[in-house]
Image: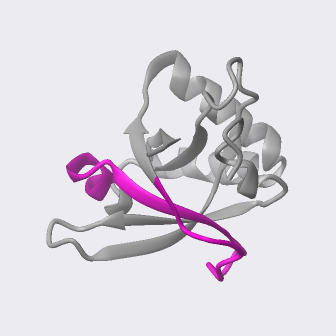
Amino acid sequence: MSSLNPFAAFAGHKYLNLETFRKNGGGVRTPVWFAAALPEVPGAAPLYVYTIGNTGKLKRIRNNVRVRIVPCDMRGRLLGEWMEARAEILDGAEAEKGMKLLNRKYAPWKQLLDFFALFRRRNRIVFAIWPA
């Protein structure tokens, strides 16, 4: 892991495996899309992830910000070593910034999913992942 970019292991990957923790300490692993911003200060840029507002991973993050992450394929098969991190639920301008980065990285698939999500009236929540 580089001290300048703690997330260097995720460069070039489309998915990360996100492990969130239940109240009893048990981990739940989920492959998710993510996007990284270019850091204005070395090492100071999070990874952005989005989810529907009522998912289990979001409930677990609200209870415990500790997460573990690792690059993976779309099926969740690990492509590296686990890394300790923390998650922060975003709103406002920072959430918009994360959503724009995700839209750019996953075009046109994310826009298509967003279009169909309009019919279900599901709100999307963006969260940032920071190194621990």
Which residue does the image show at 68% across and 72% down from the upper left?
A: 80
Asked if residue 59 lies in the magenta stretch, the reply is yes
Which residue does the image show at 63% across and 63% down from the upper left?
A: 16
Which residue does the image show at 45% across and 41% down from the upper left?
A: 125
Residue 18 vertical placement versus 86 (above, below): below
Residue lying furthest front in this view? 3
In this rendering, position of residue 99 left or right of residue 30: right
Residue 115 vertical placement versus 23 (above, below): above
In this rendering, position of residue 113 left or right of residue 46: right
In this rendering, position of residue 57 left or right of residue 38: left
Residue 11 vertical placement versus 15 (above, below): above
Q: How many marks?
A: 0
x then y, percent, for residue 9: 73, 57
Which residue does the image show at 71% across and 32% down from the upper left?
A: 37
x then y, percent, for residue 126: 50, 39
x then y, percent, for residue 130: 50, 40
Q: Nearer the viewer, residue 8 or 77?
A: 8
x then y, percent, for residue 60: 28, 58
Q: Which residues are magenta?
A: 58-84
Q: Nearer the viewer, residue 103 or 32?
A: 32
Asked if residue 44 lies in the magenta stretch, the reply is no
